[in-house]
Amino acid sequence: MAVCETCGNDYEMAFQITAAGATHTFDSFECAMHAMAPRCEHCGVMIMGHGHQVEGRFYCCAHCASAAQGASTVDHV
């Protein structure tokens, strides 16, 4: 069995994700998201979808990107 690095649960069906050369062990997708999902640089919400990237910064939506950077982005084109 393997221990989830987010919650510490020792679980027989744990899985590993390798990203940026580092391997992480989790017991659920929820724990993986909490550990690995980027956060909006304006409001801090966890970005689990596409989000917006402006000049290397990540935002959850066009509103946050515009509020933070004055960027002209839209959610739907």
Image (tube, rainbow, N blue to C red):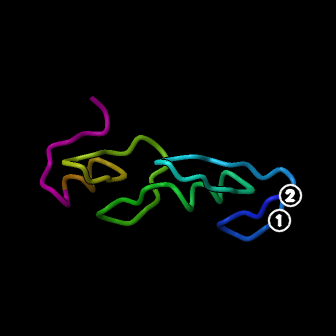
Give yes or no for residue 74 being in the magenta stretch: yes
Percent of width and height locating residue 76: 31, 33
Percent of width and height locating residue 57: 26, 53
Percent of width and height locating residue 73: 20, 42
Residue type, numbered disc 2: Met
Circles 1 and 2, Cβ within 8 Å, touching? The answer is: yes
Residue linked to disc 2:
1
Left or right, 67 with reference to 49:
left
Percent of width and height locating residue 2: 80, 59
Report the span colored magenta. Answer: 67-77
Front-lying residue, 22 or 44: 22
Left or right, 39 with reference to 32:
left
Q: Residue furthest front?
A: 21
Left or right, 52 with reference to 22:
left
For image coordinates 70% across by 70% down, the residue present is 7
Residue type, numbered disc 1: Asp
Callout 2 crowding tier (Cα within 10 Å): few <14, some 14–19, many ≥20: few
Residue linked to disc 1:
10
C-alpha distance separating marks 1 and 2? 6 Å
Q: Is residue 14 above or below residue 8?
A: above
Left or right, 14 with reference to 66:
right
For image coordinates 46% across by 48% down, the residue present is 20
Q: Secondary structure at mark 2?
A: loop
Q: Secondary structure at mark 1?
A: strand
Quadrant showing the N terminus: bottom right
**Prevailing SS of the magenta stretch:** loop
